Amino acid sequence: MAGQWEVVIGLETHAQLSTAAKIFSGASTAFGAAPNTQAAAVDIALPGVLPVLNRGAVERAIRFGLAVGATINERSVFARKNYFYPDLPKGYQISQFEIPVVSGGFVAIVSPTRGPIRIALTRAHLEEDAGKSLHEDFHGMTGIDLNRAGTPLLEIVTEPEMRSSDEAVAYARQLHALVQWVGICDGNMQEGSFRCDANVSVRREGEPLGTRCEIKNLNSFRFMQEAIEFEVRRQIALLEDGARVVQETRLYDPDKHETRSMRSKEDAQDYRYFPDPDLPPLVIDNNWITRVRESMPELPEAMKRRLVSQHGLTEYDATLLTANRALVDYYGQAVKALQAGDAQSNKLVANWVLGEFSAALHKVELDVAHAPVSAAQLAGLLKRVADGTISGKIAKDVFDAMWAGEAHGENAADTIIATRGLTQISDSGAIGKIVDDVLAANPAIVAEVKAGKERAFNSLVGKVMAASKGKANPAQVNAILKTKLS
Amino acid sequence: MSDVVTGTLAQVAAALRAKQLSSVELTRTVLARVDAAQGALNAFVTVDAEGALAQARAADTALARGNAPPLAGVPIAHKDVIMTAGLKTTCGSRMLSNFTAPYDAFVAEGLKNAGTVLIGKTNMDEFAMGSSNETSYFGAVRNPWNTEYVPGGSSGGSAAAVSARLVPGATGTDTGGSIRQPASLSGICGLKPTYGVCSRYGLIAFASSLDTPGMFARTAEDCGLMLNAMAGHDERDSTSLDRAREDYTRDLTVSLDGLRIGLPAEYFGSGIDPDVAAAVEAALAEFRRLGATTVDIALPNVNLSVPVYYVIAPAEASSNLSRFDGVRYGHRAEKYTDLMDMYKKSRAEGFGAEVKRRILVGTYVLSHGYYDAYYLKAQQVRRLIAGDFQRAYEKCDVIMGPTAPSPAFKIGAKTDDPVQMYLNDIFTVAGNLTGAPAMSIPCGFDRVGLPIGLQVQGNYFTEAKILNVAHRYQQATDWHQRAPRGTA
């Protein structure tokens, strides 16, 4: 009996580098301009014009290489990839072929099945994007928009080391966060700033690699997951029927939830790569690398270790926080504003940032930068939780009110607590009076408690809290009830 | 007047500065002479009378004010591979026969800033591919010394225009000999500077690692004056060299006493026309009289230059010419069924036979499975050839030999035999493969009165030395003063 099917996935990701100008011309890279208004002579390939490398793109490639622990090659070579297409004005794309700017490195992920693993990178190379062919707007014709032509891309290629669609998505999410973390890519998948192609094959465990198919242009994590899962099912079905997988390029159709053939290997073009004679080899000396290293932010791994050892957070919370630089920055600002710094306070902030705050963001699909509650406002709220002014439960109402814009400024929480009269009741006399009233009104339940029913006690706590409109200090309510019932 | 119009570039500049005549007067005369010669020579593709007269008026104003740039009012012409803002720039091809350049090439800018008056654009082999100027979409250029003969190529129009004294100087480009070979066949000077000294920005690319802008003139001094205006660093060309400015005429008169001339055995073997061999020998004798010594040197790999060149140049060309696809500019077929048909027809109609041949060769040598055997091997041999020259320059200061193996041939004589045509470049291509400077200077005539050129090669950045060697020779000889019948 043959072994289990094993899935083998490698990813190629095109990350658009966040330079203001294109990689070989001075034209702007801004998204959404009128067609062909951001195409310089170099981008439309007028006769006689020549590419001049944008060093900002190289710097971003170096940043990436440092972030993934890769080798920054001292000398790399730009090559021409030759093919004809109307949105490729020169008839070739300038890319890197034999010697890329970045070799090796890895991205650490947490696999749902294998736990923490490292996905090895083969390489990352610089290249220019092509323009766009617009098939819809022109009756019987194709429009060409060269605004995107020459936009700098970093193509990041993994080894075939992922074993499930979950791992592929975990890698893609981690990479997506990382390129934004180190400030080289805005990560905007709708605008095509971060696009993945997946190479998928299956084999029986222990056997050599099977024939792979490449699925192009997966521009969301959900599509990636669906496309890979469809492709795996398709390939296994073929092989179990005794058929063969044909090496080909496939496109994912998100409407039909299936991949379909785009072109087979036989139709594959001979790109006739050769070193671009217009561009001398790219030389990156140690000084350049050192300068870039000095400008790097703390990397997620290092920050994670610091959050565990110095902030007293759990590994789990630290991992979640450092998956998103804006989020962990927000956490840091809130901790600072809270002015406590002990592990308990830090933990409280982390819980709120990862809990209420993240949930509120997701609900309305906002990013951290546009959150209506600032880190200082959140700290103001948590200060009142820490000093017992309000309970955690009331705090959630106050947070919702802040989010809805009920009060503004750093003291928004205090304003809301005051106007709504939410201050926690910690006066034992006041609580004792409420308890007496509740006991008097519920003799049957009191009898049950005295008969030893735990649940009946909780019911009384609930009634006291309700009678205080949630403001009674729950710990005191517990203690007073116990005393009076004993 | 007639003396000035056929004078050297230095003489014309001086006459204008001395107000012997105005630039407008001179330009009118030049335009008339260009017009009169066009039927016989076909040297020009475009003549810009209006633009030239406007530039001449501006030059006259500057000259009158006394703040004129060095070459104010001097008429020149550009090879039609050089982009000139607002003027048609055809590259000798149907593909670009209606293409108007939207900007100036770096070298065009430099000569404009130096005050020159652009008369027009000169005919050339299509996309600079040819050694006889017979591949032009606009018809062959004819040699002013005998119009049954070719002027050489690919910069044949510029060579003919300078040879016929229509303009004192003109630009050219040299990818495998396209300045030096036509200079030799047309009896004038042609200098290919070190690769990277003149920016390639605005040159319609043929073979990017070989293409070198340069110039034609009748004297070494004139070449130096033009180079002063054309050289310089340009950030728009990543292969342009960032070097201190220099005056290329500074060493013209330095004595040649002790100059060591290297003579490679490979340049004096069989296959050289006996009249060419005799003229070169006579020139070497003259140099010895001027104080130079000759030393035998070896360039063991230089005989591989032509095959190496005909791998690298077509490879780069096949890629460089991909942008001429009928999509954005240039020729597009009138009728086509789909995208692929549009590509095929536009390029089939837009390119001539020689261009197609080289695109095919280049595509082949870059193809999967052939790349290592052809392109990579050629690049390795290219480095060996460069090494040969570096070793040779330990023993000599300049290297001399014939520029071309024979004088001009008759129009049509070699059009059916591309390999014979390619062998015209046998002595010149090495200079492009190494990137070092080289020059052709007139050194005699063959038995039917066709000019012969001597090639002077030097190590990197020795333009001033090469011009010095050529200038001293021209002070001692009068070959460069001989003019084709009816031109002076």
Image (cartoon, helix red, strand yellow):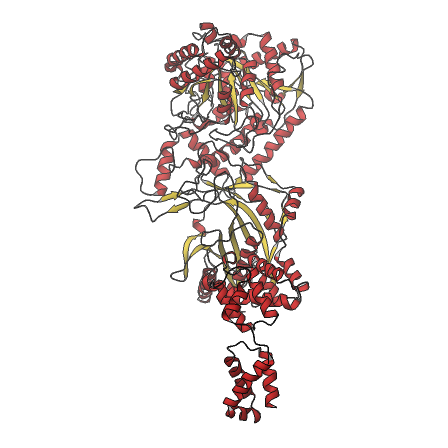
The relative height of residue A238 versus residue B15 in the rendered view (above or below) is below
**Which residue corresponds to the image point at 30% horizontal and 46% vertical from the top-left?**
A140
Q: Is residue A114 visible?
A: no
A275 on left or right of A70 = left
Residue A223 is left or right of residue B265, and the answer is left
Q: Describe residue A189's horizontal placement relative to residue B278 as left or right.
A: left
| Image: B99 above or below A310 | above
Tell me: residue B242, above or below residue A319: above
Residue A26 on image: x %, y %: 50, 38
The residue lying toward the viewer, choosing from A102 and A159, is A102
Q: Let me know if residue A382 appears in the view.
A: yes
Is B474 placed left or right of B26 in the picture? right
Taking depth in this image into account, of A355 and B200 the one nearest to the observer is A355
- Along the line of sight, the residue nearer the viewer: A217 or A344: A344
> Which quadrant is the C terminus of chain A positioned in?
bottom right
Q: Could you tell me residue B167's position as x and y percent?
A: 46, 14
Of B123 and A55, nearer the camera is A55
- Count of numbered badges drawn on the protein: 0
Q: Quadrant of residue A141?
A: top left
Depicted A155 relative to depicted A164: above or below: above
> x, y percentage for residue A418?
53, 68
Rendered location of residue A416, percent (x, y): 51, 67
